[in-house]
Image (tube, rainbow, N blue to C red):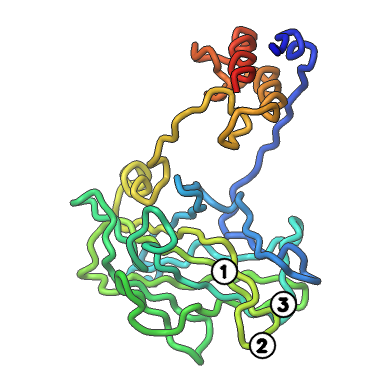
């Protein structure tokens, strides 16, 4: 049975949008502080998403200590809870950062330290980074290419305060500064919590996310070359015409999304069913044809 295009015209609705500000710290917290079941990361804190669906935040190695020229490290981004967004932890909960082998957990990573080499235009499991622990009782975590050289993983970031809040920064030090080549250095990490510390186990882990640091590259090369190798814009997925809700199939569930795009005069490739570069009423008949053929 064919659907009448008139049904779409009579069902148009208005679309509203909200603007969000970028945060300098990565906001995190539990889904429910009383009975946590998931570790939540605010997507508004991140700069990009890779082609394999991993969120990414970038930073820069700089000479943080004016009395130690040539010593490159980063203390941005930091980590913070956000009470206004309901992202909190519990008092006394230990929050840690766990470094993952990106060769196992990412389609693009190659090790614990993922170095973008401008000379080869590729990622290499090379370079040495140290995550400086926020306590004096444990040693720093040292990563060497495809291995953990020394230290304890995960590393401690901070403990929840009386209001269930944390705001802390850890130092990620680029070791062997004189020999460390210019490029981009990335680590794939996740946040973890032992909100029941008496059991001696990690109770919650966040989804993995990238931290990628520029060392000496121009901003344009860092964004267009280095981040490409970490998967930002690296894979061009084929467009499935009619799949406006982006779930991988064309079904009746796409109708409302098609109406949203059509009524907002915005553009989405999946809604441009006649492929003329715009989404307008001329696409309705073609959308109906696609929907009726599945």
Q: Is residue 223 left or right of residue 77?
A: left
Q: If the image is split into quadrants, where does the N terminus sit? A: top right
Please name the residue shown 31% across and 44% down the image. Answer: 225
Which label's residue is closer to the chain start, 3 or 1? 3
Please name the residue shown 50% across and 78% down the image. Answer: 154
**Residue in the foreground of this view, choosing between 201 and 149:** 201
Circle 2/circle 3 CB separation < 8 Å: no
Q: What count of labels does the image hold? A: 3
Q: Residue furthest front?
A: 1
The numbered dot on residue 161 is 3
Q: Is residue 293 left or right of residue 65?
A: right
Residues at marks 3 and 1, CA–CA distance in whole angstroms: 17 Å
224 lies above or below 209: above
Q: Nearer the viewer, mark 2 or mark 3?
A: 2
79 lies above or below 131: above
Q: Is residue 7 left or right of residue 146?
A: right
> Helix, strand or loop at disc 2?
helix
Which label's residue is closer to the chain start, 2 or 3? 3
Circle 3/circle 1 CB separation < 8 Å: no
209 lies above or below 14: below
Which residue is tagged 2? 199
Which label's residue is closer to the chain start, 1 or 2? 1
Residue 82, visible in the rendered structure: yes
Q: Pinpoint residue 69: horizontal percent, then vertical percent.
A: 30, 71
Please name the residue shown 44% across and 68% down the image. Answer: 100
Q: Pinpoint residue 258: horizontal percent, then vertical percent.
A: 66, 22
Residues at marks 1 and 2, CA–CA distance in whole angstroms: 18 Å
Which residue is tagged 1? 191
**Residue in the foreground of this view, choosing between 4 and 117:** 4
């Amino acid at each position: 049975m064919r659907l009448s295009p008139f049904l779409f015209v009579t069902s148009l609705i208005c679309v509203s949008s909200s603007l969000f500000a970028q945060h300098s710290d990565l906001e995190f917290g539990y889904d429910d502080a009383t009975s946590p079941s998931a570790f939540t990361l605010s997507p508004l804190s991140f700069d990009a998403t890779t082609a394999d669906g991993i969120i990414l935040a970038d930073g820069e190695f700089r000479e943080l200590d004016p009395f130690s020229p040539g010593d490159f490290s980063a203390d941005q981004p930091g980590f913070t809870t956000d009470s206004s967004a309901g992202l909190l932890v519990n008092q006394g909960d230990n929050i840690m950062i766990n470094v993952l082998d990106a060769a196992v957990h990412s389609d693009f990573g190659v090790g614990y330290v993922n170095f973008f080499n401008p000379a080869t235009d590729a990622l290499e499991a090379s370079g040495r980074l140290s995550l400086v622990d926020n306590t004096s009782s444990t040693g720093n975590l040292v990563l060497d290419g495809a291995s953990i050289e020394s230290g304890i993983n995960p590393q401690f970031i901070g403990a929840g305060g009386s209001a269930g809040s944390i705001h802390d920064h850890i130092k990620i030090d680029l070791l062997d500064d004189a020999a460390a080549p210019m490029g981009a250095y990335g680590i794939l990490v996740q946040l973890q919590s032992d909100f029941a510390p008496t059991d001696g186990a990690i109770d919650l882990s966040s989804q993995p996310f990238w931290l990628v640091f520029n060392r000496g590259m121009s901003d344009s090369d860092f964004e267009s070359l280095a981040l490409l190798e970490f998967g930002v814009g690296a894979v061009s997925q084929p467009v499935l015409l009619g799949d406006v809700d982006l779930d991988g199939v064309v079904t009746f569930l796409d109708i409302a999304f098609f109406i949203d795009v059509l009524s907002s005069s915005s553009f989405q490739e999946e809604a441009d069913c006649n492929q003329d570069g715009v989404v307008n009423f001329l696409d309705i008949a073609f959308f109906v044809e696609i929907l009726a053929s599945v």
